[in-house]
Image: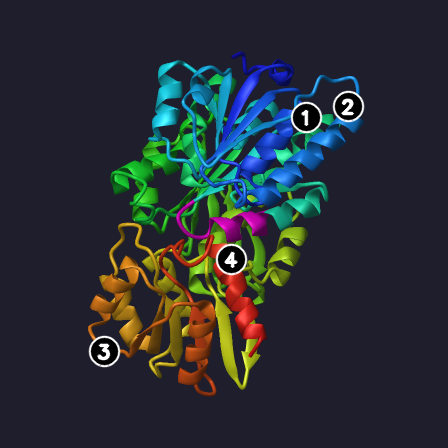
Amino acid sequence: MDLSSIHNFQDAVVTVMGLGRYKRGSGMGATKWLVRHGAQTVITDLKNAEELKESVTIIMDWYRRYRELYPDRTLYQPVFVLGEHRKDDFLNVDCVVQNPGVPSESEYIVAAKEQKVPIESDVSLFFRFYPQPIIAVTGTKGKTTTTLLLAEMMKRKDEKAVVAGNIKVSPLEHLDELIEEPNAIPVVLELSSWMLESLPQAFADIKRGPAIAILTNVYPDHLDRYPSFEAYTASKRIIFEHQTPDQYTLLNADHDLVKGMAPLVKGKLFWFSKDAREEHGCYMKGGNVVFRNNGADTVVIPVAEVALKGDHNVENILSATCAAMLSDVSVGDIADVLRHFEGVVDRQEMVREVDEITYINDTAATGPDAVIAALRRFGTEKKDIVLIAGGVNKKLAYDGLGEEIVKVCKAVFLFPGDASDLLNAAIKGRVPVTTVKSMKEAVQGARSAAVRGDTVLLSPGAASFNLFRNEFERGEQFREEVRNL
């Protein structure tokens, strides 16, 4: 299939693999966009019709609406193949759009590739068809905070600025309206490693990468999906490997693995670091956030005035500020955003204080390193943390987390799963551990274990698909149970 023009999707047969249940997520966004542009769309998902009832209803409502909005187009009613995948839907088609949640090793994706069927994603299609500059953010930790912080800065430059990607919003939700704009609209995309894996062919075809690529850090994660840590790391490098010399790469100078990637950068390299450097970049210097370019320093804001707290957030603040400065957002607007942006839902989010006990939702901490960051921010030697954690392992190690828990936690409540077994073994009986089977049981137990001045922290360090649909549902259940106290 010729992917050089949106018009070529008219009458094309396209399979969407993975519809999903996020109303504006990758599968839903891709399906709506394809139907709108006249593709004969087949949607296939291993979830059954009952599980995807709401998603199917939404798609069909949009199909009927498009028929009214575009009477001059030939639009095809989408076909749903649910509860199974059929190999024919991947072989006798013009294109396959792969949801980021679908492994590239899937026998159906492999079969399609062998037949030379193009494999795309909602993100790769967006890069192909949006010709204006795109800022892309990735990393194991901090990418959502960086993305949303940077988006707020970009909205000061242009209130129409778009933020999408790995934040449950497909960029295809915005593509058509962006193309119609007479001027370039800023776009900030958060990209997971799985999204990045879908991009090399698109980057090669359009002969460019993101206008600004930000890599916050790389820690062991998703090793249940990748054959090795190096394979996971390689997926992160995709963000800058296809850039042109006039595009910008922002790397974390405080992270040795990321710092070591500098020789591979093809664009203009800018650093961010807690320590001042002589190279281009954004640094902490003399108690200020400072941007350095062409040998000149610009003071952006005193660190004491920044609302986003926590040592782990420093790289998010610096990388977002650096990208905003390179995008010609005014220093005053950047500083104003930094004074007011306090964080992201599901990431060290203060939910409520009850009887002088603070409840923190950090459900997005799906690996041990993220939990350690939360414990170091909120915990003290008084052992004033009651931790709710555990679940399903992603082939990660928990020994280091066990030692951190012993330092600052008075009690731990663990959801069932092999990650919990490893964590319990790492704690070695030095802190009381209780296994719980629901969020209600976890919150009620934590409340009983806590006293005035303590913090109840949901920071799982694992997946929990055995109890919750995803980490966001896990966080919402935590908020709901805390609200009910």
The amino acid marked with disc number 3 is Arg
Q: Residues within 10 Å of mark 4 (few under 14, many from 20)?
A: few
Q: Check whether the beta carbons of the residues at disc 2 and disc 1 lie within 8 A of each other.
A: yes
For image coordinates 38% across by 48% down, the residue present is 217
Residue where numbered disc 1 is placed: 36
From the viewer's side, name the closer residue of 70 and 232.
Answer: 70
- Percent x, y of residue 162: 64, 40
- Percent x, y of residue 386: 39, 77
Q: Is residue 84 shown above or below 305?
A: above
Mark earlier in primary sequence (1, 3): 1
From the viewer's side, name the closer residue of 415 and 236.
Answer: 415
The amino acid marked with disc number 1 is Arg
* Helix, strand or loop at mark 3: loop
For image coordinates 32% across by 35% down, the residue present is 234
Residue where numbered disc 2 is placed: 70
Mark earlier in primary sequence (2, 1): 1
The residue segment tinted magenta is 139-150
The amino acid marked with disc number 2 is Tyr
* Helix, strand or loop at mark 4: helix
Mark earlier in primary sequence (1, 4): 1
For image coordinates 33% across by 33% down, the residue present is 263
Residue 171 visible here: no
Q: Check whether the beta carbons of the residues at disc 4 and disc 2 lie within 8 A of each other.
A: no
State the CA–CA distance, disc 4 to disc 2.
36 Å
Residue where numbered disc 3 is placed: 430
Overall secondary structure of the magenta stretch?
helix
Residue where numbered disc 4 is placed: 473
